[in-house]
Image (spheres, helix red, strand yellow):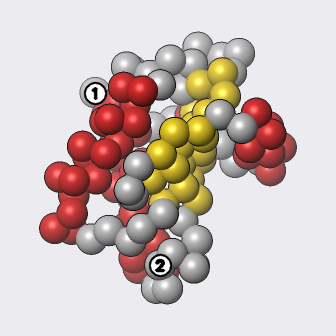
Amino acid sequence: MFSFPKQAKLVKTDDFSSVFNLRKRISNQYLVMRYRPNGSSSARLGLIVAKKTAKFSVQRNYMRRVLRELFRLNQHQLPAVDLVIQVQKVFHRPDFVEIKQAFDALCKKL
């Protein structure tokens, strides 16, 4: 039903830099969401999960998978923006409902 095509990903350093330079951000306990309106018709996603936040790659990859899936399910509700989501605090499987609520709250603020 909903897909996550290549066009929905922020990959290039210039794309990330342009979002950081605009300095629009919203945050909560787990996530920092930086955003910038883009010229396309859909939202695009970039993720930052630092080694400083989560020491093990297994944890970092789990957090990326969860955030990518939440974006994929909600991308039709988002305006045409470039999003860079940075994880501030490690989360695990038991925290999934909390993360989903935090992500939804940030999306509503957009």
Relative to 86, residue 101 above or below: above
- Residue drawn at x 51%, y 75% as measured from the top left: 53
Residue 3: quadrant of the picture: top left
Q: Earlier in the sequence, mark 2 or mark 1?
A: 1
> Helix, strand or loop at disc 2?
loop
Relative to 84, residue 65 above or below: below
Q: How many marks?
A: 2
Q: Is residue 19 visible?
A: no
Q: Position of residue 110 (x, y in %)?
A: 47, 25
Q: Position of residue 99 (x, y in %)?
A: 28, 53
- Residue drawn at x 39%, y 76% as measured from the top left: 59
Give how far apart the Cα atoms at labels 2 and 1 are.
32 Å
- Residue drawn at x 74%, y 43% as measured from the top left: 20
Q: Nearer the viewer, residue 70 or 87?
A: 87
Q: Nearer the viewer, residue 63 or 72?
A: 63
Residue type marked 1: Met
Quarter occupied by the N terminus: top left
Residue type marked 2: Ala
Q: Nearer the viewer, mark 2 or mark 1?
A: 2
Q: In the image as oriented, which residue stretches furthest toward the right?
A: 14
Q: In the image as oriented, which residue stretches furthest toward the bottom?
A: 55
> Helix, strand or loop at disc 1?
loop
Query: Callout 2 environment at 10 Å: few (<14), some (14 to 19), or many (20+)?
Result: some
Q: Is residue 48 visible?
A: yes
Q: Label 2: which residue?
A: 54
Q: Nearer the viewer, residue 73 or 102?
A: 102
Q: Label 1: which residue?
A: 1
Numbered tag placed on residue 92 in the rendering: none
Q: Position of residue 64 (x, y in %)?
A: 44, 60
